[in-house]
Image: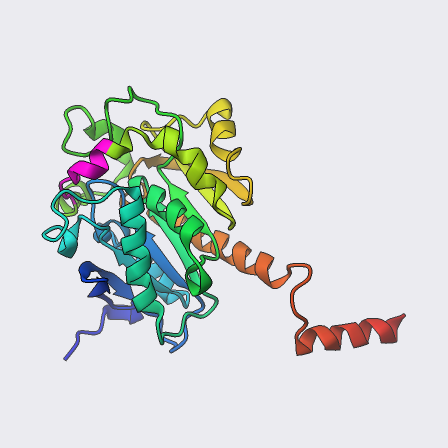
Amino acid sequence: MALVPPCGVPPVRPVTLDAGGIPLSGLLALPAQPVPRAVLVALHGSGMSAGYFDSRARPGLSLLELAAAQGYAVLALDRPGYGASAAALPEGQDLAGQTATLLAALEGFVRGRELGAGLFLVAHSGGGRIALAAAAAARGPLVPLGVDLSGLGRRWAVRPWQPDGPDLPGSWRRYWGALRFYPPGAFRLGQDLLRPVPAVEARETLWWPEMYPAVAAGVGVPVRFTFAEQEQWWRHDGEALEELLTPLTGASTEVARQAHAGHNISLGWAARTYHLRVLSFLEECLLARDTAVGRVATGSDRDLKKVDADLT
């Protein structure tokens, strides 16, 4: 018999998706109602795992539990080269390969499943590269409503031969920032989330600033970037932000700052605040879609037009 979490907290369970013969493991949280309002797909950063979005340091910090309680389904995946796919992909995959594998897994996941309004991508750090590439390449029901990114920019704040990876000397502070940003136990629990960075991914990370414009040009959905107060991997000054946003010619964009946080926002005290803002951005994406000019008229639209005609 499955254990029911206390106080009606939505359960989080492990899942494994098939991506053309490559298993992708992860975590799934479902809302109480049979049809979710939408499905959030969460992608962790380099050297992490799906549990990044399911912090257990304190109640209320988990994105999976919070979003499911608000009526959304959340699928947090171990990216290709991590988790269950590590044995099949010991060197990992490049950006194109990870994108294709992710979309193959999601194609199977959405088949015959109620998605509500559709998919919405949430990603941290290196996972943001895959999220943007997937948003550009997706077709049909896989096209996301929007993309919410944290811990990802375009211009390095460190020397380019210092790629991200929690196992690299001197990188600890860049990932976590001030100790006061994290509840007691967060670092111990965080150690359980760490994974080796696949070699192919680690090498390609260095070239992201050069790869970014081509990826960004293909994105046609709203994108929001969040930079922590002590983000130390990426520059987020005015000049750097202009270089980041300019290539997103087909997307509406937004930039946010998260106070009281380091690079690993979803593992700190600020996690709940940030995750609520993620859901707020999703709500804005839904609002923009529902009120878009030129959409097919519904019955309610016709009723409103009749009221307008009666009043004039």
Instruction: From the viewer's perspective, tell me whether residue 211 is left or right of residue 285.
Output: left
Which residue: 19% across, 30% down?
172
Q: Quadrant of the N terminus?
A: bottom left
Say whether residue 189 is magenta.
no
Q: Quadrant of residue 303?
A: bottom right
Which residue: 44% across, 65% down?
141
Q: Quadrant of the C terminus?
A: bottom right
Which residue: 17% across, 76% down?
2
- Residue 61 drawn at (x, y percent): 30, 52
Please tell me which residue lies in front, 281 or 137.
Answer: 137
Q: Quadrant of residue 200?
A: top left
Please provide the residue range marked out in magenta.
194-203
Question: Across the whole image, how many numbered discs are drawn on residues?
Answer: 0
- Residue 25 drawn at (x, y percent): 19, 59
- Which residue extends farthest top? 159
Colour style of the rendered protein structure = rainbow
Instruction: From the viewer's perspective, tell me whether residue 212 is left or right of residue 265.
Output: right
